[in-house]
Amino acid sequence: MKNVRPVLRWMSILILFFLFACSTRQIPPVSEPGSDSLASDSLSLSEPASDSLASDYLYAALWYQRGVEAKANIIIQYKLAGMMLNRALQSPDWTAAPEEQQGDYQNKPPAVILDVDETVLDNSPFMSWLAVNNFYYDSIHQPDWNRWIDAAKCPALPGALEFIHAAEAQNVKVFYVTNRPASQQDATRRNLQAVGLNVTNDDIYLKKEQPDWGSPKGSRRKVIADHYRILLLIGDNLGDFVDGYKASYDKREEFLNMDAYGQLWGEKWIMLPNPLYGSWEQAAFDHKPDGKNRSEIRKSMKSFLHVWDGK
């Protein structure tokens, strides 16, 4: 019995040590990669997602907001737009809207059409808010997006104001065609005015402002083309230039090389970079996100990548 007691004493010490270690160690939760859902009730303002479900916006938001490379790219595009505008004013047959610009347009007053978000106004503060909180832009955070728009706090993108003011100084009318809903017209105007632009509600063409003004912008471009010669289209999304943007990746790439469009890029159509969002990501799930969770969407996106085989 004398030999048993020391053994029992050491066993008790080991058990207590083990229990103490288990009580203090933080065991990470087990979760499947990409299991966060676009409509998950657990993803709330008071309960950010774990780092294992980190937001995909982080790298894009940092590049877009703090990268000199991003700013330089945008400035270059607006300088190119300025040079093309001067050329367009010297060429009466020049039009950036060959499908909408019909009939005798040569003598119409000149105009340019710009998108708003990530073309004139910078929403990266909102996207950064999503990123640092590990949120995704989904139906849960649609009200937060609306609050951001209503606050009218978007800064202007570099080069945008200089281009717009230069165009107006040459008596070129500037129109803003955006897929913000009609209910955000006043907030959009206030924000554009806040960054230094002389804008009225009549200059802004919003989605569903008229019954036939859907997400495709061709119907709105047509209204402008009926009264103006459109010299340039400037945007960050394929849909700012053509109505067939809700298509597959292969079909979308055809717009770069088709005879009807190929010569327009970089001359009459000026595309700005936007790695934050756009129809380019929606093409991975056939532009139909409803009913798909984040895991399914990410899996679909990965399937379109050209991946190194490691050899």
Image (tube, rainbow, N blue to C red):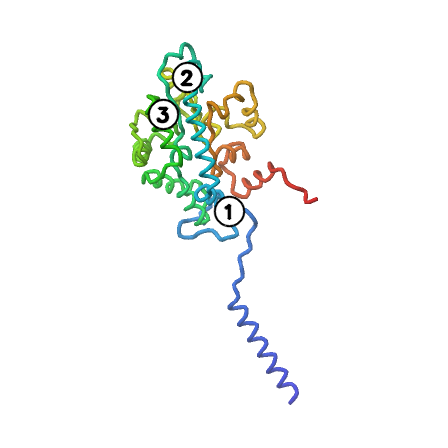
Q: Is residue 16 above or below residue 97?
A: below
Q: Position of residue 81 (x, y in %)?
A: 43, 27
Label 1 vs 2, first from the N-terminus: 1
Helix, strand or loop under label 3: helix
What whole-number distance in Å separates the C-alpha atoms at marks 1 and 3? 46 Å
Instruction: Identify the amino acid type marked 3.
Output: Ala
The relative height of residue 246 versus residue 152 in the rendered view (above or below) is above
Dot 2, how many residues are within 10 Å of its Cα: few (below 14), some (14-19), or many (20+)?
Answer: few
Task: Report whether 49 appears left or right of 148.
Answer: right
Q: Quadrant of residue 209?
A: top left
Q: Quickly name the residue at label 2.
A: 90
Contact? badges 2 and 3 (CB < 8 Å): no
Q: Which residue is mark 3?
A: 167
**Residue situated in front as seen by the camera: 72 or 54:** 72
Name the residue located 44 percent from the left edge and 17 percent from the top edge: 95
Mark 3, Cα crowd under 10 Å, few <14 / some 14-19 / many 20+, is many
Label 2, label 3: how many angstroms apart (C-alpha)?
A: 14 Å
Which circle's residue, 2 or 3, is located before the other in the chain?
2
Q: Write down the residue under mark 1.
A: 36
State left or right for residue 83 relative to residue 297. left
Q: Quadrant of residue 114?
A: top left
Whether tag 1 and tag 3 are in contact, CB under 8 A, the answer is: no
